[in-house]
């Protein structure tokens, strides 16, 4: 059965949308990421206008983060103070991101901006993950423990505006978490991602948060940022399609549960290797789209008067 | 604007050029409203008509044109810069029909001279935008726009697709694809004789969203803040429900 998307103004097959949501939900449940980085490109490949794809994916991320955050909250694994500080930075980043988004859209460079940002980000993160998982797989074979790379944080200790984060057992300046929130908020608005896959490593290695609270805290912060971005995208770009979101979420929550169950049977390094391959594959596809000769060098956009 | 100009032209020229007892035309459309519902995947309408006081089929042609509401088209040309394809030049075609269908008894070049076709906006190549904003030769951009719209089935030319049921009775089927804009469409039927328009009729056709789709679209446009909040509330609610439904026994 075809369904008509009132904001995208096009007909899609509901099974395709539920299926896309399901596949992305599966990946996000399996690897513990939001999956926005996969969903936006997949929707664009399917023919959804990139503005609608970016804005609507955020609703999917809100829903899957909510589901995950509730499970963490029951375990009391959320540092709400930290989430609040990061959210404050995230709101500012979101406002800047949505403004940039509207600017790029007017300039006709939307596809290039989204594509290039994706390629850079996914390429970097995919390569790092691939390297680390290969190294740890090899040392697991050799029977040696893996040492986490230490990041020099001396500069962080000298920053002002220190604050106590009880649950994370940290006493640090609010500037790094706010800055992190800002960057990820801006990226989220442009790319339609929650940013969990950047934020989680940054919180562990940069902020030195205990691993037990990292997941829950990043999910709580993502709910806040994606919720605000959704409202901003709806008001400034009219790009949120609620019917599309509904079908994506329904597929997503089911896929996520299957993913969570399967991930329990795989080892951490194997999971990270798989995720690295998925990330690099998406990156490769997007890169091809940017450098391959287009079928038609002219493109058309219709605007209502 | 253009549509009104054409109608005025028809009103003034036709009666003077062809006083009483001239060949004339009556036409109609199978429906005057198309409702876009949740399972709308495109439809088609039938345009039909009859020739009154016929003067024989030799040198006589019928052209049916359906125009959608005017829109602005932005055409961009990509160029390879440092290995990456980047949008570089653009042209803006102001006031082009968002949908265009042309059916005729014969190929257009056999029916009338280009200047006459341009005057009535008959044929994709003879459509003239109200205004062109471009720093370059706009012709390749305009051609590209038509090519894209044809690919989307929004622009179609179907010469030779008018069926005559008798000497004077004709009809043609006009497809209306899924991607059409909402608004007022115009169905125009032209009767040509010897390369000149001798009679023409125009009938409006309305395409509109209906039911839930309409309400959601209006909601998104009229109250975007509350619409955004509703989307967030829906996501949070569904996330919460799923976490309760799939909660694993501790």
Image (cartoon, coloured by chain):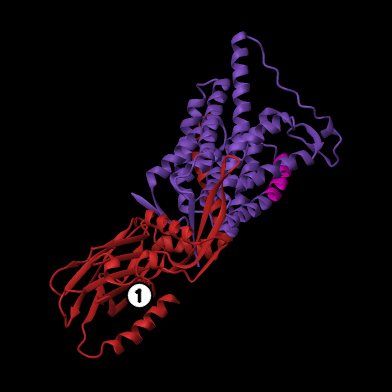
Chain colours: A purple, B red
**Helix, strand or loop at disc 1?**
helix
Q: Quadrant of the C terminus of chain B?
A: top right
Does residue A213 sit above or below B236 in this rendering?
above
State the image coordinates of residue A107 (x, y, percent, origin top left): 60, 55
- Magenta region, mostly helix, strand or loop? helix
The one nearer the camera, B102 or A273, is B102
- Vertical placement of B92 versus A13: above or below? below
Residue shown at the point (62%, 17%) measured from the top left: A136
Residues shaded magenta: A82-93
Residue B209 visible in the picture = no
Inspect the magenta stretch and tell me whether residue A84 lies in it: yes
Q: Is residue A39 above or below residue A205?
A: below
From the viewer's side, name the closer residue of B12 and A267: B12
Residue assigned mark 1: B116
Q: Residue furthest left?
A: B166
Q: Please state the horizontal and vertical placement of residue B14, each as a whole percent of the image.
A: 30, 85
Residue A46 in view (yes/no):
yes
Spot occupied by residue B116 in the image (x, y as percentages of width and height):
35, 75
Q: Residue at x 42, y 44 (%)?
A: A17
């Amino acid at each position: 059965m075809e369904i008509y998307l009132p904001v995208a103004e096009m007909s899609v097959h509901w099974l395709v949308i539920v299926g896309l949501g399901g596949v992305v939900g599966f990946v996000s449940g399996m690897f513990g990421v939001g999956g926005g980085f996969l969903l936006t490109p997949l929707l664009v490949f399917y023919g959804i206008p990139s503005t609608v794809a970016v804005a609507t994916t955020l609703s999917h991320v809100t829903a899957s983060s909510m589901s995950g955050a509730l499970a963490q909250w029951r375990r009391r694994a959320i540092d709400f103070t930290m989430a609040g500080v990061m959210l404050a930075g995230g709101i500012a980043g979101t406002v800047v991101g949505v403004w940039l988004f509207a600017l790029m859209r007017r300039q006709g460079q939307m596809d290039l901006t989204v594509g290039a940002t994706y390629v850079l980000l996914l390429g970097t993160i995919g390569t790092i993950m691939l390297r680390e998982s290969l190294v740890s797989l090899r040392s697991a074979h050799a029977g040696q423990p893996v040492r986490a790379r230490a990041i020099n944080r001396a500069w962080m200790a000298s920053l002002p505006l220190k604050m106590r984060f009880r649950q994370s057992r940290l006493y640090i300046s609010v500037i790094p978490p706010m800055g992190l929130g800002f960057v990820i908020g801006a990226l989220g608005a442009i790319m339609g991602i929650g940013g969990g896959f950047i934020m989680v490593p940054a919180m562990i290695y940069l902020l030195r948060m205990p691993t037990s609270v990292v997941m829950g805290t990043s999910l709580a912060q993502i709910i806040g940022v994606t919720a605000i971005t959704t409202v901003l995208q709806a008001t400034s770009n009219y790009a949120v399609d609620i019917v599309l979101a509904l079908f994506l979420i329904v597929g997503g929550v089911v896929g996520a549960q299957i993913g969570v169950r399967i991930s329990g049977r795989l080892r951490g390094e194997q999971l990270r290797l798989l995720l690295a391959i998925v990330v690099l594959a998406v990156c490769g596809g997007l890169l091809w789209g940017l450098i391959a000769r287009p079928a038609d060098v002219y493109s058309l956009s219709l605007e209502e008067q | 604007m253009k549509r009104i100009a054409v109608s005025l032209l028809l009103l003034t020229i036709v009666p003077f050029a062809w006083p009483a007892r001239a060949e004339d035309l009556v036409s109609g459309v199978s429906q005057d409203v198309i409702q876009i519902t949740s399972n709308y995947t495109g439809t088609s309408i039938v345009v039909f008509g009859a020739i009154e006081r016929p003067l024989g089929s030799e040198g006589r042609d019928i052209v049916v044109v359906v125009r959608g509401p005017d829109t602005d088209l932005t055409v961009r040309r990509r160029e390879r810069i440092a290995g990456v394809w980047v949008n570089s030049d653009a042209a803006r075609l102001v006031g082009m029909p968002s949908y265009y269908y042309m059916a005729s008894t014969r190929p257009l070049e056999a029916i009338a001279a280009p200047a006459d076709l341009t005057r009535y906006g008959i044929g994709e190549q003879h459509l003239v935008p109200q205004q062109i904003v471009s720093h370059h030769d706009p012709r390749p951009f305009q051609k590209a726009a038509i090519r894209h719209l044809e690919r989307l089935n929004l622009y179609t030319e179907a010469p030779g697709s008018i069926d005559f049921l008798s000497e004077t009775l004709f009809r043609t089927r006009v497809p209306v694809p899924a991607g059409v804009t909402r608004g007022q469409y115009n169905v125009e039927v032209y009767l040509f004789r010897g390369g000149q328009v001798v009679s023409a009729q125009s009938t409006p056709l309305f395409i509109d969203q209906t039911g839930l789709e309409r309400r959601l679209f209006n909601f998104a446009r009229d109250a975007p803040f509350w619409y955004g909040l509703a989307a967030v509330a829906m996501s949070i609610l569904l996330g919460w429900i799923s976490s309760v439904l799939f909660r694993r026994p501790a």
